[in-house]
Image (spheres, helix red, strand yellow):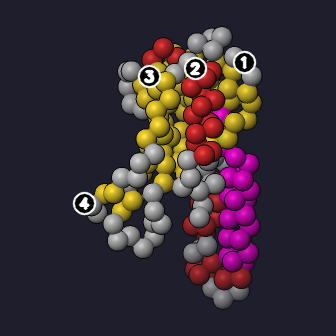
Amino acid sequence: MFDWIGSLRVAEKSRHRLVLGLARATRLAGLAMIAIGVLVATWFAAISLWLAAIPGFLIVLGAVVATLKRELVFDREEGVLRMSQSALGISNSSVVPLFHLRAVVIIARPARMGSRFHSGTGFVAYVDRRVGDAIFLDEARRSAGLFRMAEAIADLAELRLEYEAAPVIDETA
């Protein structure tokens, strides 16, 4: 239901550069959570100040979501992938040479047997590295958007595109 919160979108695309960033809906969702939290807190404050602290969790969570930033820049001219992310002003960035990347992968996420909350198989996209851990891109219930993003990355960075669409059932759950 809330797949669009935190989803990466192509922000800029040229022959030598691809920029992926969070969708604007992520920031709007965070601001909406803050607004709802403040309204509920003021309503609860009329009853009790202690009760007004309960929606504070929603306000804090909304602030985290509203300030969330994630950007991946694939730059063919410089031969690097620049990754940066931040939340509440705390940031982290790193640079990975493109020759360390092996493939862009889209796989079917296992569907849990008997789960009431998970309606079928979803898909996960990541960049597989020759050295180090994989770089998570995004996940979605449908693979079309992930495939377009993975295809753009593979074309620009000259990586192999691996697509495993067969649903996997996790029987251990």
Give the quarter of the figure containing the N terminus: bottom right
- Cα–Cα span, label 4 and label 2: 37 Å
Residue 84 visible in the picture: no
Three-letter residue code for mark 1:
Arg
State which tag comes first along the sequence, 3 or 4: 3
Element assignment for label 2: helix
Report the magenta residues as a range. 20-42
Three-letter residue code for mark 3:
Arg
Residue topped by disc 1: 15
State which tag comes first along the sequence, 4 or 2: 2
State which tag comes first along the sequence, 3 or 2: 3
Residue topped by disc 3: 102
What x and y, as percent, mark residue 149? 62, 36
Three-letter residue code for mark 2:
Ala
Q: Was residue 82 drawn as part of the magenta stretch in this picture?
A: no
Element assignment for label 3: strand
Q: Are marks 1 and 3 in contact (CB under 8 Å)?
A: no
